[in-house]
Amino acid sequence: MFWVSTKRIFRSGYINFKRNGIVSLASVLMMTITLCVLASLIFLQAALDFSLGQIKDNVDITVYFSTSASESKILSLKNTIEKLPEVAATEYIEREQSLALFKERHANDFLTLQALDELDDNPLGATLTIKAKDPSQYETISNLLDGESDLAKENASIIDRINYHQNKVVIDRLNGLVAGTERLGVAITIALALVSMLITFITIRLTIYIAREEISVMRLVGAANRYINGPFIVEGIICGVIAAALTMLIYWPVTYVLHDTLVGFLGIDLFDYFTSNLFQLFGLLLLTGVIMSSIASSIAVRRYLRK
Amino acid sequence: MIYFNNVSKVYPNSVLSLEDINLSIGQGEFVSIVGHSGAGKTTLTKLILAEEKPTTGSVFYHSLDIHTLGHDAMINLRRRIGIVFQDFRLLPNKTAYENIAFAMEAVGKTDEEIASDVPHVLELVDLSNRVYHFPHQMSGGEKQRLAIARAIINQPELIIADEPTGNLDPVNTLEVIQILKKINDLGTTVILTTHNKDVINALGKRVITLEKGKIIKDEKGKHSPK
């Protein structure tokens, strides 16, 4: 009996969806718009994450050691720094390596190279490049090496200078930008998602309002509640599935066309992101569409099932 | 079969619809309820279907107090009553066949039963040539006959026809009344409301006259069962 009535509910939901024509089309379109908004929010977040990550990645501070600093002392400092919770990675460049890099950079600058050859000793000190886990932590790290801490005092003799202060303005601005953009992104996401969900809910409620007479007839014929609202929920599910598929079909060409613009502008390849996350994206849209429309349907029908 | 015990109904805007109704309707009777619009005929039928609750008094269906029934018992009761409305109340998105099949599906009949019974009942109300038509493609008389077919498909004990002829011309009216009479002859109790006395004069069955919410006349017809 359970299977028979489930089969009937699905068949009748499908037939109603087909016969309701324009009304079904309207709900599918509204749902598609909602899902498009959702998808573009996902893309926006991906683009933001990507660009911010790239910018963050380009920030670091460099500690320049004096030429007389012994390698063992530098390495012990490096070990200490690496153990700090704020530090993501360090890169140590020895004196000879610094020189080699310098020469490479100035390969066309014959005069400089000649002047360098005149010197008895390598004038360049070793450097230690530090990357923090978060841009806001550079200040702490810099203070630790530069200020009144024990670590700073202990190593004052070997540290020549730290370039944090030169970069401070840029890093501070970046921190503000990163925090602001993330907050704005979340706010926009929530606001747009709420608005489009509301619109979908209202559309589905309207389609069921149109069918309220039918619902009362079904009750009078003696149909159980499950048998009355079942087909409406099935209609909602069909609507969600079609809308999710439509959204994917819309974004395929859109991300393809925008490919060049976005790579140039934000550095992210959305088409690549789209195709490599195809199934996760479709799954998410499908789930959202189906859950939203079936919940909206069952809430809307329940109104007319009371009494 | 149906008993009204001192039933009054006052609507929330304090309009008195029914006042102190005592009435009993026996199995197999054909009862016509006549009265002007607003006399309380529809309220009477709604009380039997539990679409409205009485303000005072109670309504019994056999030994069941209709207004104390739970949800499932209510659904069960409705399955034992067939209803015909003035405005047909067909499902607009379903064909004639599906409208009747829906009523059978709702009570859990098998696909085989549906496939064998639906054509049969459509033939009974002379709609064999309208099987795949939607309600909006049918005339008023055809719609009402379809509604009757839906009402009788599950062999109910009782048919309530609330102004079934209100929207029909005299020829279709006669036809609908004849069908109801045929159903009654087969043993089903029928309650018919109408404001048109001519409709029931020809029947010679029991007639209850309502006026301003009260029963003012209850005439046993010459063909009524004792």
Image (spheres, rainbow, N blue to C red):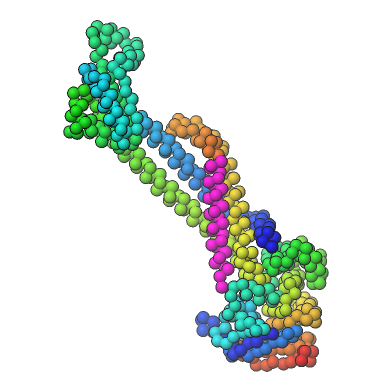
Q: State which quarter of the image contains the C terminus of chain A.
A: bottom right
Could one spot residue B148 in this view of the protein? no
Q: Main secondary structure of the magenta part?
A: helix
Residue B173 visible (yes or no): yes
Q: Which residue is pictured at 77% across the width and 89% down the height? A: B224
In this rendered view, identify the residue nearer to me: B165 or A78: A78
Residue A216 placement: quadrant: bottom right
Which residues lie in the magenta part? Answer: A279-307
Decide whether residue B222 is among the magenta residues: no
Q: Is B81 on the left or on the right of A250, as rendered?
A: right
Give above or below for A6 relative to A127. Answer: below
- The residue drawn where x is 56% and y is 56% is A294
Asked if A118 appears above or below A269 in the picture, the reply is: above
Give the percent coordinates (x, y) of residue A110.
31, 8
- Splitting the image into 4 quarters, where does residue A105 fall? top left
The quadrant in which the N terminus of chain A is found is bottom right
Q: Relative to A193, is A230 on the left or the right?
A: right
Residue B9: x %, y % from top left? 56, 85
Q: Relative to residue B200, is residue A287 drawn left or right?
A: left
Q: Is residue B49 above or below residue A284?
A: below
Could you say which is closer to the camera, residue A154 or residue B222?
A: A154
Task: Report the label total.
Answer: 0
Residue A15: percent from left, percent from top = 68, 57
Instruction: Give residue A157's position: percent from left, percent from top.
Output: 18, 23
**Residue at x-position 46% and y-position 53%:** A194
Residue closest to the eye, A155 or B187: A155
Seen at 33% across and 25% down, the residue is A91
Let me know if residue A295 is in the magenta part: yes
